[in-house]
Structures are given as structure tokens and as C-alpha cells.
Amino acid sequence: MQEVRRFKPSTVSRRMAVVTGFYRTCVIDAVLEHSPADHVRRPRVPNESPVLGLFHLQFEAVLAAARESTDRFDFALVAMLGLLGLRISEASGANVIDLGEEHGHRVLLVHGKGGKETLVPLPPAVGRALDQAVADRLAGPILLNRRGRRMDRHCATRRLHNLARTAIVRLPRLHPHLLRHTYVTTMLDAGVDLRDVQIAARHANPRTTMRYDRARKNLDRHPNYILAAYMASAT
């Protein structure tokens, strides 16, 4: 996988985890006496994600381009990916009936990985974007393509490419998951607590969230300063 197909270490490690889990199950079920994958070494995966998302001004440019687009679904798409942190499968799979209210908050019922369902609160700007996309429809997908059918990841990617061409600043090649990266990195840059970001992004492991923190090496944020300030009266 590494030498012939040139897969990245993260891809190889993920696929080997599946193989290792399969053989471990075979041992547990007494199909095999031992796992042939026990001593297979996986490649080291970097602690930092190679894709960290858009910077603040770039993200603002994408939002502005989507808001001014003649296609009313563009702003809803960018808002769902970049301001709610949805995966493209979650955004494209969302339906009008998934919109509702809970304890005074407008919410979207998100159908996530593994069949997990989560209520995600909608900030006012996102709510307006979804209202514009839904218009007077009472059912069906929230995001539609130009043929009036459910938007898929390929259509979403093309829409993002079009927005990148019309943005006022130069942008990297946009794809749906890049906006989810942006969602996480922007919250971390804004100083949101790591635990809160993990919950919002629905990461099972906090280490996944930490990989997106591009400012974690910033010495201005080092906890030594917080501790020293807290203990100032004694020191």
C-alpha cells in the first residue's frame, strides 16, 4: 500500500486497523489460534492533520461568495459544512422534516455515522440560510441540485469549486471536508475549550480534535502563564 499504491500513512494505518480487528475477532470466535496481524507494524501517523482548513479571512470570503450566489442552496451548503461542522453525507442527507425546535432553540436533527442521531442548534445566520433553501417546501431534502434532486457530494464539490472562483481572495482547492476542518480549526483559534470542540465536532477521541489545533504550539497560550497568574499572590 505504501510502496506500490503510494497511500498516505493515515490511510495505511486505518486499513490495517480493520485487518487487525478482523483477525482479532477470528481468534475470539476460535476460528484461528492466533492472529497473523499481531506483529504487523503500522506506519507512524503525524500528530497534526496535514489539512487544517481555511484561515479566518479565507473562510469569510467563502461565506460572502456563497451569500451573494444566485443559487440559494450555496449559502445553505457552506453554512451546514462550515458553521455546523456537518460531514457532507450528513448535510446532503438532511431533510426538511429534520428541522425543528428544542427548548427555545432552532435545531437540526443530524443523522451521523453509525446511525447516531444528534440535535444540532442553529445559529440565526444558519437558520436563515436553511429557510432560504427550504422556501415553502414541507418535505424532501434541504439541499437540492439544479435538477431539483438531492444534492450529492459530487455536486457539492462542484458548487464549492464555483464559489472559490468567484471569491475575492485566492483560495485552495475547496472540497466538502475542508470546510469541516475549517469548522474545527476556527473554533480552536477562537479559544473554544478543546472538550467543547470535541463535543461539537462529535469526535469520539479528543486526540482527533487536537490534530486540528494549529495554534497549540503558540507559547502565548501556554498554561504556565495561567498557573503563574492564579498563584500570583503566593509567588
Image: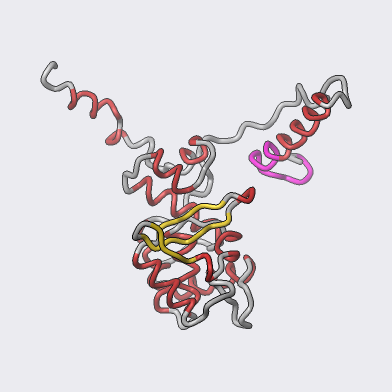
Q: Residue furthest left?
A: 233
x then y, percent, for residue 219: 30, 33
Q: Nearer the viewer, residue 8 or 11?
A: 11
Task: Measuring from the top left, give residue 79's x and y in whole percent.
Answer: 44, 65
Residue at x 38% of width, y 37% of height: 216
Q: Quadrant of residue 175?
A: bottom right
* Residue occupying image coordinates x 52% and y 39%: 208
- Left or right? Give the position of 190 relative to 101: left
Question: Is 7 contained in the magenta span?
Answer: yes
User: Which of the 4 image quadrants contains residue 159?
Assistant: bottom right
Q: Is residue 231 above or below residue 159?
A: above
Residue at 53% over, 71% down? 96
Is 133 situated above or below 48?
Answer: below
Q: Position of residue 49 (x, y in %)?
A: 52, 43
Q: Is residue 120 left or right of residue 57?
A: right
The answer to whether 182 appears left or right of 40 in the picture is left
Say which residue appears at 70% left-offset and 44% top-offset. Answer: 7
Say which quadrant the C terminus sits in: top left
Which residues are drawn in magenta?
Answer: 3-14
Q: From what the image shows, is residue 221 above or below residue 35? A: below
Quadrant for the N terminus in the image: top right
Residue lying furthest top in this view? 234
Percent from the top left, x then y, of residue 46?
Answer: 56, 35
